[in-house]
Image (cartoon, rainbow, N blue to C red):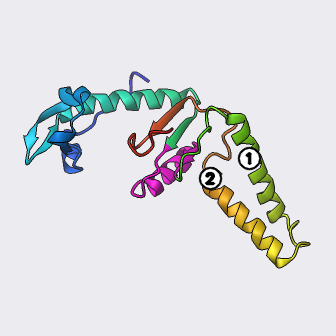
Amino acid sequence: MDKTDIKLSIDDMAKAGLNFGHRVSKLHPKMKQYVAGIKSNVHMIDLEKSAKEFERALKFISKLVLEGKKILFVGTKIQVKELVKEAAQACKMPYVIERWLGGTFTNFETISKRVSYFKDLENKRANGEFEKYTKKERMKIDKEIESLRNKFEGIKNMEKLPEAVLILDLKKDDTC
């Protein structure tokens, strides 16, 4: 773990636009140490300090992955939904890309019961057990399955609480 040193290119970070912060009026006091200057009423972020913190975060994440622990990816903004889903599926980790469900951590037992109900409905539909129902009843069941899929698709294989949560937007996903 310690032998693999993660190097981030500051030039690549600048090309990606990571040096642009918020407007001057939106500065959080704890972020002052990461601000390098002001340009056009926008704070410019110090990329050297940011690269060190990114490396620290990446080392933490890789340590968790090497230990076989789970990380829950949370990104509900439209711009990052697909990216979060692809990254989480590639890593075989749970994810949330729709609305965060209150009680996912604090009331995990109830959430896991709903997830098992969702899995049961999917299995029954795959096995053709709903063919005996009328067309209207099957449509109602399909609508319920789709609603549950929106809520639980990313966490349906999560048997226990994750060891870490990666939140991509703290402002939008503050409830999680």
Tag 1: Cα neighbours inside 10 Å, few (<14), some, or many (≥20)? some
Percent x, y for residue 52? 27, 28
Spatial CA span between label 1 and label 2: 10 Å
Percent x, y for residue 19? 19, 42
x 63%, y 45%: residue = 155
Tag 2: Cα neighbours inside 10 Å, few (<14), some, or many (≥20)? many
Question: In the rendered structure, which segment of residues is drawn in magenta?
Answer: 74-97
Where is mark 1, residue-wise?
114
The N terminus sits in image quarter: top left
Above or below 119: residue 59: above
x 16%, y 33%: residue = 35
Percent x, y for residue 65? 52, 32
Residue 87 lies left or right of residue 68; in this view the side is left
Percent x, y for residue 64? 51, 28
On residue 146, the disc is none
x 50%, y 53%: residue = 86
Q: How many marks?
A: 2
Above or below 172: residue 63: above
On residue 151, the disc is 2
Residue 160 lies left or right of residue 135; in this view the side is left
Quarter residue 55 falls in: top left
Outermost residue, front side: 25
Outermost residue, top side: 2
**Which is more toward the observer, 107 or 68?**
107
Q: Earlier in the sequence, mark 1 or mark 2?
A: 1
Magenta residue check for 33: no
The three-letter amino acid code for the residue at tag 1 is Arg
Q: Secondary structure at mark 2?
A: helix
**Which is more toward the observer, 49 or 36?**
36
x 46%, y 37%: residue = 166
